[in-house]
Amino acid sequence: MSPREIEIRVLTDIDVSANVLWQIAGPGFANVAAWTQSVERSNAEGPPVLPGAPCAGRVCHVNIRGYDTLREEITHYDAAAKELAYRVTQGTPSFVLLAQNHWTIRPVSATECQVEMLCTLRLRPIAGLLLGGIMSRQVRSNLEAVCEELRAHALATASAQQTESV
């Protein structure tokens, strides 16, 4: 039996510029705890390995049932394209062979953008059959919640920047 691979794609429109959102997601990668309740605290780990990346990865102490601490490594970072990808290197259950997320931020207009999260999970064969559906629903729900928190934080950030420039 081969491992089961699951892809979960979440698209979210946000009424801020792509540049505002990129500052939060890209250069602010390690500060994820500042804007999502699913992460209690986070910090950068290691000097940047990829050109332009803010760090090699991050450690997240999470508020997600069944998890405690996740270590994540940046695997792709392209500031010009506003794309980044990372994979979890430590902290997932043993039946998870791969957990990675790829973010792309696309401008829609000068004041609106879209963020796409493409999460890929690879599960051990039997666990994939038994738990794949549950994992897929849980991860989708978590990603959708994170996107809503990202939206709220980005709107607050953009509003604060406008206030400062007045």
Image (cartoon, helix red, strand yellow):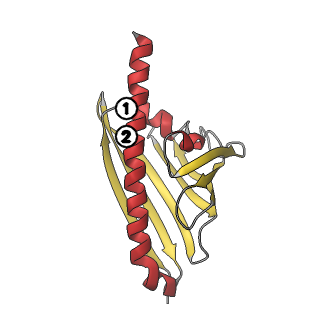
Disc 2 to disc 1, C-alpha distance: 6 Å
19 left or right of 114 in image: right
Q: Does the CB distance between marks 2 and 1 fall below 8 Å?
A: yes
Foreground of the two, 91 or 89: 91
Q: Is residue 2 visible?
A: no
**Label 1 secondary element:** helix
What residue sits 40% from the left and 29% below the top?
A: 156
Residue 3: image tag: none
What residue sits 32% from the left and 51% below the top?
A: 11
Q: Position of residue 58 (x, y in %)?
A: 64, 49
Foreground of the two, 3 or 12: 12
Tag 2: Cα neighbours inside 10 Å, few (<14), some, or many (≥20)?
many
In the image as oriented, which residue stretches furthest toward the left? 109
Q: Relative to residue 26, is residue 138 depicted above or below?
A: below
Foreground of the two, 153 or 56: 153
User: Type of residue at label 1?
Assistant: Leu
Q: Position of residue 85 (x, y in %)?
A: 51, 52
Quarter of the image for residue 134 reads bottom left
What residue sits 38% from the left and 23% below the top?
A: 159
In the image as oriented, which residue stretches furthest toward the bottom? 1
Quarter of the image for residue 89 reads bottom right
Quarter of the image for residue 108 reads top left
Q: Which residue is mark 1?
A: 155
Q: Which residue is mark 2?
A: 151
What residue sits 64% from the left and 49% below the top?
A: 57
User: Type of residue at label 2?
Assistant: Arg
**Label 2 secondary element:** helix
Q: Relative to residue 159, is residue 83 depicted above or below?
A: below
